[in-house]
Amino acid sequence: MNATTAPSPFTASSMAPASAASVIQLADIEKVYQTSTVETLALNRVNLSINRGEFVSIMGPSGCGKSTLLSIMGLLDEPTSGTVVIDGRPVTSYSDRELAHLRNHKIGFVFQSYHLINDLSVLDNVELPLLYRKGVSGKERRQRAHAALDKVGLNARMSHFPSQLSGGQRQRVAIARALVGNPEIILADEPTGNLDSVMGEEIMDLLLTLNRRDNTTIVMVTHDEQQALKTERIIRFFDGSQVS
């Protein structure tokens, strides 16, 4: 990962205080997308800290850099410059193997469009992340998938296929898939965006329960002000910059 800019002091306006409790820290993060004719600044000197056990919302208009920020936090994308720190350690100090381990063990992802495989049952979809873990037997995969589905209230639907489920149920499956690896952090990109208000409330209640019961750190991108107000902190973006 390119991280050429040294960390600057974190600003306090949109961050919890940086401390030993911080699980993710971003310092002077910039992301530039370039084509042969156009240069687009997606993120402009972003500084923030996410503390362990927090539930944080990221808000702003479409195209302001929210999803890009989430991808950088989740190590799916690299900043053009700046420093990403996970558990007090700069990401640039991790080997490729260690980065893969972080993505697979520490971080769970929930997407607006679910990303379920229609030809697989609910149970098989939830098991998928564990297929990439060495030393996890088929029996253990099943047990952990059952436990994750139980957390989201969908054990009765484990033999169904995604096409047989409502939108809210499919999002619950996606959350169970994120939980099956027992991650410390969940990064959720518009998890209620494709749902009606009733289903959206159910998913939000589920995320709040996971945060409070299991102390799971959750960072959620959302356009929904009412849902964001239920979280501990709101970080607002406009044109790639933090505005509050």
Image (cartoon, rainbow, N blue to C red):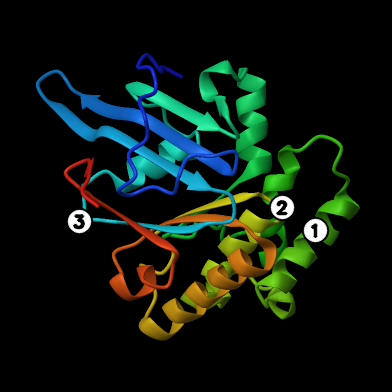
Q: Residues within 10 Å of mark 2 (few under 14, many from 20)?
A: some
Tell me residue 191's x, y (percent).
44, 64
Instruction: List the residue tagged with mark 3.
Output: 61
Give me the residue at 87% from left, 53% from top. 140
Residue lying at the far top of the rendered structure: 4
Q: Is residue 21 left or right of residue 105?
A: left
Q: CA distance from mark 3 to mark 2?
A: 32 Å
Q: Is residue 129 left or right of residue 60?
A: right
* Mark 3 or mark 1, earlier in chain: 3
Q: CA distance from mark 2 to mark 1?
A: 9 Å
| Label disc, if present, on residue 112 of the rendered structure | none
Q: Residues within 10 Å of mark 1 (few under 14, many from 20)?
A: many
Q: Residues within 10 Å of mark 3 (few under 14, many from 20)?
A: few
Instruction: List the residue tagged with mark 2.
Output: 182
Depth check: give the residue in front, 161 or 239.
239
Q: Amino acid at mark 1?
A: Arg
| Label disc, if present, on residue 144 of the rendered structure | 1
Q: Amino acid at mark 3?
A: Pro
Depth check: give the residue in front, 173 or 122.
173
Q: Does the CB distance between marks 2 and 1 fall below 8 Å?
A: yes
Q: Does the CB distance between marks 3 and 1 fall below 8 Å?
A: no
* Mark 2 or mark 1, earlier in chain: 1
**Residue 137 higher or lower than 165, as above or below:** above
The secondary element bearing badge 2 is classed as: loop
Give me the residue at 55% from left, 76% from top. 165
